Image: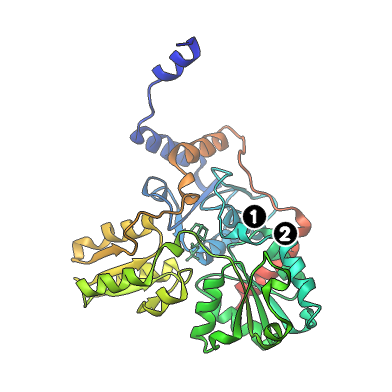
Amino acid sequence: MTANAAAITSAPAVTDEEWDARIRAAKAALGERLLILGHHYQREEVYRHADVTGDSLKLSRQAADSRAEYIVFCGVHFMAEVADILTRPEQQVVLPDLSAGCSMADMANLAKVERAWRELASVLAPDETVTPVTYINSAADLKAFCGRHGGIVCTSSNAARILEWSFARREKVLFFPDQHLGRNTGHRMGIPLEQMVTWDFSQPMGGLTPEQIRAARIILWKGFCSVHQMFRPEHIDRFLAQYPDARVISHPECSFEVCQKSEFVGSTEYIIRTVAESAPGTRWLVGTELNMVQRLHERHRHEGKSIHFMSPTICMCSTMFRIDPPHLCAALEALVEGRVINRIQVPPDEAAEARLALERMLQL
Ligand code: 13P
Ligand code: SF4
């Protein structure tokens, strides 16, 4: 064994309690200069340190209202970008691990969306007839695209209101990157499935004919969440066969079939509230990320509620999981020393256009 290897293997491991204590000490040292935001999918060891927890919409609003010098975002990359766009220039946003992305957000990029817009222009005049709507799970340059083209951002908790706003202006919507949120929301608003077509971004013209494009009300980008696609309608059937009185609740990133079989569909914040408000003793089947479902189970089991995860296999958001106590601790201790590591900064021109699309949403 080399001297270096010996040094590494003999280094004492930092225990969970030590990470916890160091994070608390750094938080105390930074006081009101620091705001830690935590998404509901964060693991418990990180979540407990958040000053505010929430879904994407709530956390965006918190970032916009904050006066803290440093905002440490325990979530994924697009969320930290939104926080940077909505805060003042002197505030700095930190993502403890820069590799915490979102695989769904990566399914759309500016080159592909601009190509789609050009291809749509060969059939209709998109700037007059199509509102581009981007799910908040998208890169800042796509929000900027929506800002430039009269479009808007939505989250899983306001998608129906955003679609209403969009249809009041133009007759069609190009919805990206999550086909499921778009389809589930459109269907609940009464739009027939045949009027919602899927744009396959790997094919010319999205794989659609001019007639299909002209007849569509919503053009759905063919993106999806790899976590929520794990939930299947047969999981619900099996569970209800065993527990006929159980209630079923799902996130709108789940497939159309899963949402159709769910009694309730809504954002992470909505799921938490609905389960909390249910009667003691209720049994729930929940179709969303594992860390959140486990936390719900722990929180409510003393009321006799029983909260079950929808998939028989473990599926977590692996990128949310990248934010762990060592990364959070390193980010905070650097701030105590006056160093900002892993800062997220959206270029000013892009931020200005993205802010337009975000503010249209926040004003609704
Ligand atoms: P929420 O808006 O419900 O927090 O969802 C964000 C997300 O990424 C779900 O996968
Ligand atoms: Fe992205 Fe899915 Fe993870 Fe949400 S759960 S951050 S949509 S990969």
Q: Secondary structure at mark 2?
A: helix
Closest to the observer, 266 or 124: 124
Q: Which residue is mark 1?
A: 84
Total numbered labels: 2
Q: Earlier in the sequence, mark 1 or mark 2?
A: 1
Q: Position of residue 233 (x, y in %)?
A: 37, 72
The answer to whether the residue bearing label 2 lies less than 8 angstroms from the nearest atom of ligand 1 is no
What residue is shown with label 2?
A: 351
Q: Amino acid type of disc 2?
A: Ala
Q: Amino acid at mark 1?
A: Asp
Please name the residue shown 57% across and 86% down the image.
194
Badge 1 crowding class, 10 Å Cα cut-off, few under 14, some 14 to 19, many 20 or more, is many
In percent of width and height, residue 260 lies at: 41, 80
Q: Secondary structure at mark 1?
A: helix
**Could you tell me if the residues under marks 1 and 2 are in contact, i.e. CB atoms within 8 Å?**
yes
Q: Horizontally, is 160 left or right of 145 in the view?
A: left
Query: Is 204 located above or below residue 327 in the figure?
Result: below
Residue 57 to residue 328: above or below = below
Q: Can you give x and y, in whole percent of width and height, for residue 68 in the image? A: 57, 51
Task: Classify mark 2: residues with Cα within 10 Å, few (<14), some (14-19) or many (20+).
Answer: many
Q: Quadrant of residue 23?
A: top left
Q: Which residue is at 47% across, 42% downward?
A: 27
**Residue 354 shows up from this direction:** no
Where residue 24 sits: x, y (%)?
Answer: 41, 40
Seen from the viewer's position, the closer of residues 168 and 193 is: 193
Q: Is the residue at mark 1 in contact range of ligand 2, meaning its CB lies under 8 Å from it?
A: no
Q: Quadrant of the C terminus?
A: bottom right
Please report the residue visible at 64 percent of the width from the left and 55 percent of the height from the top.
Answer: 84
Q: On the rendered structure, is 34 left or right of 278?
A: right
Q: CA distance from mark 1 to mark 2?
A: 8 Å
Which residue is pictured at 78% across the width and 79% down the height?
127
